[in-house]
Image: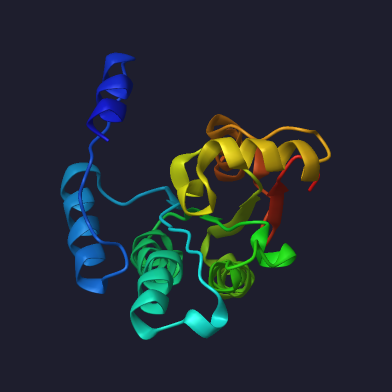
């Protein structure tokens, strides 16, 4: 994170890195209070926190499931709550945009051992649609991205990047994995005025998969 902040600042931008477990309500409140003090109310929230997991349903236990759901689902609710409190015209805000990062696993079911992960991302999809209806008239646009096989370290539980790249060559119509920058570009578009009438949408960025 420090390297990212340094890169942004070195390019003439401004950035800050704050540490928080976004699956915990009190830590999310503390993080947003720190952001308030430095920048004021946000214009955009991208809910990108998440983890993968690989365990069959008969191997499910409370600790594994709670860890996954806190990272992938609770975090989205808690961060969206704080953003809505600041963005919504109902609360005196000036509006804004929320972009939730889901996964194509929500409609494909994920890999073997990925049922809990797929379920968590299905929750993100439905929450996106519901929140869009809830706050659309309050100046907040809410959308989601569903990435496919993207070249990041998140694939460690499924054999790592090499295994992911091999899989991408066979299951992705474009024959390759995606790059993190391609997801970032889609998120930037959804957050921009170019997408001013895009609301309650779930956009696949998956190479056709």
Left or right, 25 with respect to 118, comes to: left
- Residue 37 visible in rendering: yes
- Residue at the location (53% across, 38% down)? 161
Q: Residue furthest right?
A: 173
- State the colouring used for the structure image: rainbow
Residue nearer the viewer, 39 or 170? 170
- Residue at the location (25% across, 48% down)? 40
Point out the image quarter for the N terminus: top left
Left or right, 23 with respect to 34, comes to: right
- Residue at the location (57% across, 59% down)? 142
Residue nearer the viewer, 145 or 3? 3
Q: Position of residue 189 (x, y in %)?
A: 61, 38
Left or right, 92 with respect to 17, comes to: right
Residue nearer the viewer, 109 or 11? 109
Seen in the picture, residue 163 relative to 80 is either above or below; the reply is above
Q: Position of residue 87 (x, y in %)?
A: 40, 59
Q: Position of residue 68 (x, y in %)?
A: 42, 69
Residue nearer the viewer, 92 or 86? 86
Q: Position of residue 141 (x, y in %)?
A: 57, 57
Seen in the picture, residue 87 relative to 61 is either above or below; the reply is above
Q: In the picture, residue 165 is in which quadrant?
A: top right
Seen in the picture, residue 34 relative to 3 is either above or below; the reply is below
Q: In the picture, residue 206 is in which quadrant?
A: top right
- Residue 150 visible in rendering: no
């Amino acid at each position: 994170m420090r390297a990212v902040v340094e890169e942004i600042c070195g390019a003439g931008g401004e950035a800050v890195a704050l540490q928080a477990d976004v699956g915990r309500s009190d830590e999310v409140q503390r993080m947003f209070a720190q952001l308030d003090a430095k920048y004021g109310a946000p214009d955009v929230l991208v809910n990108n926190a998440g983890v993968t997991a690989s365990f069959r349903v008969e191997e499910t236990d409370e600790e594994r499931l709670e860890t996954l759901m806190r990272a992938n689902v609770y975090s989205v609710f808690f961060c969206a709550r704080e953003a809505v409190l600041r963005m919504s015209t109902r609360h005196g805000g000036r509006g804004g945009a929320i972009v939730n990062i889901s996964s194509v696993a929500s409609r494909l079911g994920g890999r073997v051992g990925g049922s809990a992960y797929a379920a968590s991302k299905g929750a993100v999809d439905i929450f996106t649609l519901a929140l869009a209806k809830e706050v659309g008239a309050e100046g907040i646009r809410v959308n989601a991205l569903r990435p496919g096989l993207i070249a990041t370290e998140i694939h460690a539980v499924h054999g790592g990047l090499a295994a992911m790249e091999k899989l991408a060559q066979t299951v992705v119509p474009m024959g390759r994995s995606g790059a993190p920058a391609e997801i970032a570009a889609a998120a930037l578009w959804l957050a921009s005025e170019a997408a001013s009438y895009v609301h309650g949408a779930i956009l696949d960025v998956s190479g056709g998969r």
